[in-house]
Every structure is written in structure tokens, then in C-alpha cells.
Image (cartoon, rainbow, N blue to C red):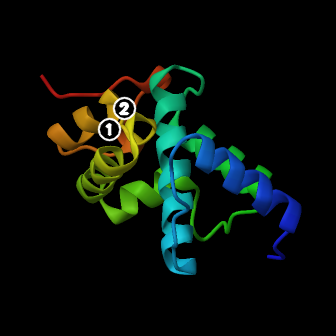
Amino acid sequence: AVEDPEVNTLLMEVLAAEGRVPLRLTAQQGVRRLHLGLMLAGARLLQSQGAHRAGDVDLVAVQMTGASRRWGGPLHAADHLGLAMILRELRALADTHGSGWEPPELLVDLVKHGMRFADCQQSGTLRVAA
């Protein structure tokens, strides 16, 4: 990526107006945050019924962002990495950086029941055995 001095100046002004300082992240940390943000957005979309299935979110992510098909999309990746770990990371980010990182109830419920995004029925509901 090429830095744009005009964009950097604008960002620094916005941060200063909010009393914040810029984060210094490694490339790996930045990529991890990007992936967590995509997972969070996908989970919220599924919970809000903006998508019917986790696979729908993943398909759009792969097709529209150019993400690797091997990665499988943000919700598939979250299932693969482990939702409990994703939940812990999102809670830590929410504690440090605010409610924008707060995990949705759907994710909390999936972890509570030992389930995955792939276990969701249409509209973000869970298939919990009786």
C-alpha cells in the first residue's frame, strides 16, 4: 500500500479531534483485525437476518473482496479457527476500543452451545437439539 499524505493528515485531524492517538500495528496485526472485522460484520448480518445462511455471507465476501477461496469467507474461517477464540478476541477489542467490537448475541449463543456458524438455519437461528 502507498501512503497518501493528504489522507494521513485527515486521519490525524480526526483522531486528534476525538482525543485519540493512532494505533501502531504490525502488518500481521492489521490483517488479523481486518479478518476479525469481517467476521464481526458477517455475524451481525446473519443475526439481523440480512443474510439467510453463513454460506451466503462467505460467498459474497469471497466474490466481492477477492478473498482467497481457500480461506472460505469470514464465517467459514471463524468456524475453522474456533468461535470461542474469536469471541475472546472480540471482547478484548471491545474492552480496549469500544462497543464497535462488541460481539453479537448470535456468536455468544453459538459458543455457549458449542456450535458453529455453519449450524445456523435460515435467518441466523440455531438448530439446538431438544
Instruction: Residue under label 2, please give it.
Output: 104
Closer-to-camera residue (116/112):
112
Q: Residue 38: x, y in percent?
A: 56, 50
Q: Residue at x 57, y 79 (%)?
A: 27
**31 or 44: nearer the eye?**
31
Q: Quick check: 103 above or below 81?
A: above
Q: Would you identify the image quadrant in which residue 80 lies? A: bottom left
Q: Are marks 2 and 1 in contact (CB under 8 Å)?
A: yes
Query: Which quarter of the figure is the C terminus placed in?
Result: top left
Amino acid at pointer 2:
Pro
Q: Which residue is mark 1?
A: 107
Quadrant in which the N terminus is drawn: bottom right
Residue at left offset 32%, top offset 46%: 116
Query: Seen in the image, is 79 located left or right of residue 49?
Result: left
How many residues crowd around disc 2 within 10 Å: few (fewer than 14), some, or many (20 or more)?
Answer: some
Label disc, if present, on residue 26 of the rendered structure: none
